[in-house]
Amino acid sequence: MMNGDNDDVGGYLNPGTKRGSDELLAQTGAVSNGSVMSPAPNHADNNNDAKKVKLDTKNPGAPSRVIHIRNIPNEVTEAEIVHLGIPFGKVTNVLVLKGKNQAFLEMSDEVSATTMVNYFTNCTAQLRGRAVYVQFSNHKELKTDQTHSNAQNPSAQAALQAAQALVNQTDTQGGPNTVLRVIVEHMIYPVTLDVLYQIFSRVGKVLKIVTFTKNNTFQALIQYPDVVTAQAAKMTLDGQNIYNACCTLRIEYSKLSNLNVKYNNDKSRDYTNPNLPTGDPALDSALAIGVSSLSAPNLNLPNRTGENATPTGMPFTGMPLAGVTPTAAALGAAGIRLPGQPSPNCVLLVSNLNEEMVTPDALFTLFGVYGDVQRVKILFNKKDNALVQMSEPHQTQLAISHLDKMKTWGKQIRVTLSKHQTVQLPKEGQPDAGLTKDYSNSPLHRFKKPGSKNYQNIYPPSATLHLSNIPPTVDEEQIKDAFAHAGASVKAFKFFPKDRKMALIQLGSVEEAIAALIKMHNFQLSDSSHLRVSFSKSTI
C-alpha cells in the first residue's frame, strides 16, 4: 500500500481486488476508519491486495486531476460530491467511500482541479452543514474495480450524466449567482419559509430568504454565501417535489446579487442578523424590554400556515434528507425530522368551539377532510376545547392551514399544535360522558391507501361542495332536499356531465358548507350508497 498517502484507499481502485460479498452493498460503505471490513480480516491479504493497485502516483500535494475530499457525512451522495466540482470544469469520475468518510472526484484536466483546490483553500467547502477538506489526490487517474465501477452504480452514473447536461446547458437566466429564485408549483400543501430553510440548508449555509406570492404562485429568493453553493443547490433541487407528486421546486438564478431583508418574520429572514425587528410592533416592543429571550429566527411567530409544525414529505431523489422515518399514511412518503428537533406532533388543540354543537363525530368528519383522524377528546371541564389526533404530522399542518380561524357553528375556531403527543383514552370505569372516541379502525378514513388520489383534491373550506358516490336512482331534487333538511340553503346544483356519480352543490356561505359537510358526509342515499362530501375549488 502507498504508505503515507493522504488518500489511503487500498484495493478500492484496483480491478483485481476481491472483497467480501456484503461489503459496500448498495453503496453503504462497509469500511471502518482505515481498515477494510472483510468477512475474515487478514492483514497479509490486505497487503497483497495493496500490491496489486495499478495507479500512477505523484508526490503528496502535487497537482493532479483527481481530488481527495475528506470528512464527508456518512449519508452523502455521489451527486453532492459531483456538485462540488461542477463550477470548476467537467467532472469525469466519482467514488464515494462512505464508511471512511472520504470521496474522490476526477476532473477532465489539472487546470480545473487546481482551480477547485485553490478555491476551497480560501473558502471552506461544506456538505450537509459539515466542513469537508479538499486537496489533491496522490493518484493521477481514478480507476475503480468492478465492485465500485460506475457502470454498476446507477447513482454515480446519474450524477455524472446530470453534471454533463448542466455543463452543456445554456442558462436563459444568465450566469450563476449567489441568489436563487424559487417557484413552488402545484402547491397542494402549505410550504413555509422554515420548510424552505430546512430543505435548502441541506446543500449549504443559507444566509437570507424572502418569500412572496406572484401570479398566484408561492415564490422565494434564497441567498447563499457563494456561487458554488448556489449552483449546487440549483442542480440538486430543481424539479424535485417537496411532497409526493406535488409542491415542485422550479429554480432559476435571480438577477439580484444581494437580498435586503428588513424584518425577521414568517415572510423574510436574515440568518446573519438575528436582531432585526419582526415588523409586529407588539412583538418588537416585548423583545426590546426583554420579555422574550428568543432570537428572531427562532421566534414562535403567529402564522396561519402552522410553519412550526414539522413538515413531512418525500426525500429528494438526488439528496435524501437526514432523519427520515417511515410513515403509514397514504402518501407512502417519509417524515422529515432534522437532528435535534422534537418528535413530530400529530395532536391538534381546537379551541373556541360551540359547546352546544360540537361532538367527537363532528370533529372527526371535519378534520377528516385533511387527514385520517385517530382520536378525538372534548375536554370535560372546558367543552369549547378539544384535542384531535391525526395519523401523520403533515396532516396536522394541513388542518392548521385550512381550518384555523374558520367560522364554524357561529364561532371562529382556533387550530394549533397541542403540547400533547397523543390523545389518551379514558381508563376503564372512568366517567367520560362519550367525550373521547377512538377512530383508528374507522372505515371512513380518506387517505388510507398509499398514493391516494384524495391527496390531490384537498382544498380550503368553500361554499361549493363536491359530492360523490351518488347512486343512479337518486336525482337532483332528492339531494337538494336532503341538504335543505340539514339546514343548508342551496343556491345551485350541477351533476358532472361525464360522471353522474358526482356533482357540485353551492350553498349560501362557507360556514353553511362546513356545517353541511359535517352533517352530510357519509349520509345514506340508498340501501348500499353513502354520500361522500368534500370542499371544491370550483364554483357553479
Image (cartoon, helix red, strand yellow):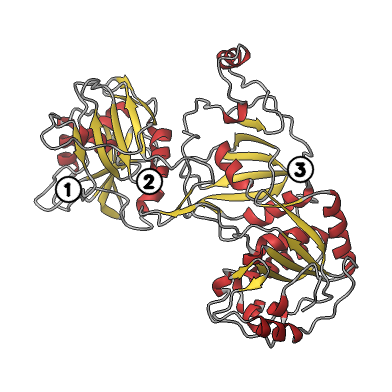
The total number of labels drawn is: 3
Q: Is residue 337 above or below residue 161?
A: above
The answer to which of 292 and 60 lies nearer the viewer is 60
Give the amino acid type for the residue marked by disc 2 in the picture.
Answer: Glu
Q: Residue 489, image x and y in percent?
A: 23, 28
Give the amino acid type for the residue marked by disc 3 in the picture.
Answer: Pro
23 on left or right of 427:
right
359 on left or right of 92:
left
Residue picked out by circle 1 = 530
Q: Residue 418, image x and y in percent?
A: 37, 31
518 on left or right of 60:
left
Residue picked out by circle 3 = 225
Q: Can residue 517 be seen in this view?
A: no
Give the amino acid type for the residue marked by disc 1 in the picture.
Answer: His
Residue 287 falls in image quadrant: top right
Residue picked out by circle 2 = 392
Q: Classify the position of the N terminus by image quarter.
A: bottom right
Spatial separation of the CA atoms under disc 3 and disc 2: 35 Å
Secondary structure found at label 1 = loop
Q: Is residue 164 above or below residue 527?
A: below
The answer to which of 125 and 405 lies nearer the viewer is 125
Q: Which residue is drawn at 69% across and 71% down?
A: 95
